[in-house]
Image: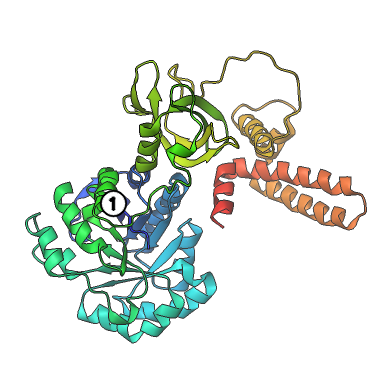
């Protein structure tokens, strides 16, 4: 079982607060905080909703949806779950999993319903190291083993039991080891370390004490979140201690590559969302290993004769999504999340000096759909006389919906006919009207494709 590092965010009044017991605001923008955790090479993010009424709960769901949209790691939604509808809302917002709080007996009553509706792989059980919570878990252990796939556990030694300072944090975890409830100990446990004052050196000891347990798959909580920018250091520390942690697992060692005369391999870099080529650089062995260890693209600068972590001075980091070698093992293709510009000129891509070009019809489906969408969006902002698109916008939502309904019916009729070209025409017509609706409602293709990808 690979051990993971999972920062958490506690949402309270649309802000991120320090811990369950300290409502000090640590971020006015929880989405930006989540993105910073994502870019720090975390393995997942847990978001706890502490809203107290329907309005604030809906606000939290909107924030959660944006977090899921702007991060690339799995998000676990927790807090304020009382019925199946709440689980559905978390999953529809983009969460990979939803947590039922078994400190509340009523949540045990909906476990079977939500698991059979959404699948056990979507269901997490959270519980605290209290007599009441442990009893609820123990009484429902058989159902949990059958219907859930993950547990979040808050041990006493990691909660408010005198841990109001760093002193003794790691030592207390060692002397009071994490002991999950017996009946569910075979389910992987994420352990919540609630000590936001813990510094990195103190957290290392606490993390080591917890992650050494066979039952524990990850740590989370305010102690980790406060040190989230140092996750790579924590990961390295755990590896050196012999803990099998989640990392980029390279199928090829450096010696497997065919190197150029300078002992390097060229790297072609692409945007992972659009496949746009961003730049070409070189790696030596040290750069290759650093990239795998940190999750940030690291190269060797031939002009400066030194290791070069992209973005180290500019902030324009490249976060690794995949590395692929070519057929001869002499070139690497890197797909990355690019922050800012890839080129030193300020251009997003280094490839902008057109040499020659023939007129051709774009065939890339994504580029075609993006192009049409952008034209429609421009028409809404800059109306053009005689434009059918502007006619639809002027008539309003009801007219757009009517046209979408009509075109959907045309597809159905065309599908019954023998002429294959007719259904293609009608589908294209429908897609156009659907994109008018998307622009009207502020929905992007990225919103839609992200949702499809999550499914």
Residue shown at the point (74%, 18%) measured from the top left: 358
Above or below, comparing residue 261 to residue 187 in the picture:
above
Q: Indicate the position of residue 34 as horizontal and vertical percent values.
A: 35, 47
The location of residue 247, given as percent across then percent down, is 38, 49
Q: Quadrant of the C terminus?
A: bottom right
Q: Quadrant of residue 417?
A: bottom right
Which colour scheme appears in the figure? rainbow
Front-lying residue, 90 or 134: 134
Rendered-image quadrant of the N terminus:
bottom left
Residue at (53% x, 73% y) in the render: 117
The local secondary structure at tag 1 comes to helix
Pointer 1 local density, CA inside 10 Å: few below 14, some 14–19, many at least 20: some
The extreme right residue here reads 418
Instruction: Name the residue located 31 percent from the left edge and 64 percent from the top edge.
Output: 52
Residue at (59%, 53%) from the top-left corner? 452
Within the image, what quadrant is residue 60 found in?
bottom left
Q: Observer-nearest residue: 349 or 371?
A: 349
- Going by the image, does 82 lie left or right of 261? left
Report the residue marked by disc 1. 239
Please provide percent x and percent y for residue 39: 37, 41
Foreground pick, 192 / 279: 279
Q: Is residue 155 something that shows in the picture? A: yes
Q: Report whether 98 appears left or right of 233.
A: right
Give the residue furthest to the bottom. Answer: 139
């Amino acid at each position: 079982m690979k051990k993971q590092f999972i920062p958490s965010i506690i949402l309270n009044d649309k802000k991120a607060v320090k811990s369950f017991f300290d409502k000090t605001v640590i971020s006015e923008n929880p989405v930006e905080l989540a993105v910073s955790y994502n870019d720090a090479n975390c393995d997942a993010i847990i978001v706890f909703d502490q809203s107290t009424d329907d309005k604030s709960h809906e606000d939290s769901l909107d924030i959660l949806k944006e977090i899921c949209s702007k991060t690339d790691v799995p998000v676990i939604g927790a807090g304020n779950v009382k019925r199946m509808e709440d689980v559905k809302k978390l999953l529809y917002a983009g969460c990979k999993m939803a947590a039922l709080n078994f400190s509340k007996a009523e949540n045990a009553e909906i476990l079977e319903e939500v698991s059979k509706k959404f699948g056990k792989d979507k269901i997490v059980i959270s519980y605290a190291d209290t007599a009441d919570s442990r009893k609820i878990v123990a009484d429902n252990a058989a159902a949990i083993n059958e219907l859930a796939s993950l547990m979040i556990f808050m041990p006493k030694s990691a909660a408010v039991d005198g841990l109001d300072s760093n002193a003794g944090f790691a030592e207390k975890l060692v002397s009071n080891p994490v002991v999950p409830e017996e009946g569910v100990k075979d389910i992987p446990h994420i352990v919540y370390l609630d000590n936001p004052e813990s510094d990195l050196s103190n957290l290392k000891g606490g993390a080591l004490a917890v992650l050494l347990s066979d039952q524990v798959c990850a740590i989370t909580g305010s102690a980790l979140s406060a040190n989230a920018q140092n996750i790579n250091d924590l990961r390295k520390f755990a590896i050196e201690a012999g803990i099998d942690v989640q990392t980029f697992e390279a199928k090829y060692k450096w010696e497997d590559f065919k190197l150029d005369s300078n002992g390097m391999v060229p790297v072609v870099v692409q945007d992972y969302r659009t496949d746009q080529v961003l730049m070409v650089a070189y790696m030596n062995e040290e750069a290759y290993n650093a990239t795998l260890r940190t999750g940030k693209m690291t190269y060797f600068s031939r002009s400066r004769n030194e290791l070069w972590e992209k973005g180290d001075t500019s902030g324009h980091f490249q976060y690794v999504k995949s590395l692929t070698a070519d057929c001869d093992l002499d070139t690497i293709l890197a797909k990355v999340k690019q922050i800012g510009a890839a080129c030193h000129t300020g251009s997003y891509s280094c490839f902008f000096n057109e040499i020659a070009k023939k007129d051709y019809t774009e065939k890339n489906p994504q580029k075609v759909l993006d192009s049409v969408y952008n034209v429609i969006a421009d028409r809404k902002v800059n109306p053009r006389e005689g434009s059918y698109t502007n006619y639809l916008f002027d008539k309003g939502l009801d007219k757009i919906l009517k046209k979408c309904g009509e075109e959907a019916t045309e597809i159905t009729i065309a599908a019954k006919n023998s002429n294959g070209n007719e259904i293609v025409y009608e589908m294209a017509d429908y897609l156009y009207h659907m994109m008018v609706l998307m622009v009207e409602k502020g929905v992007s293709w990225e919103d839609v494709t992200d949702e499809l990808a999550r499914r």
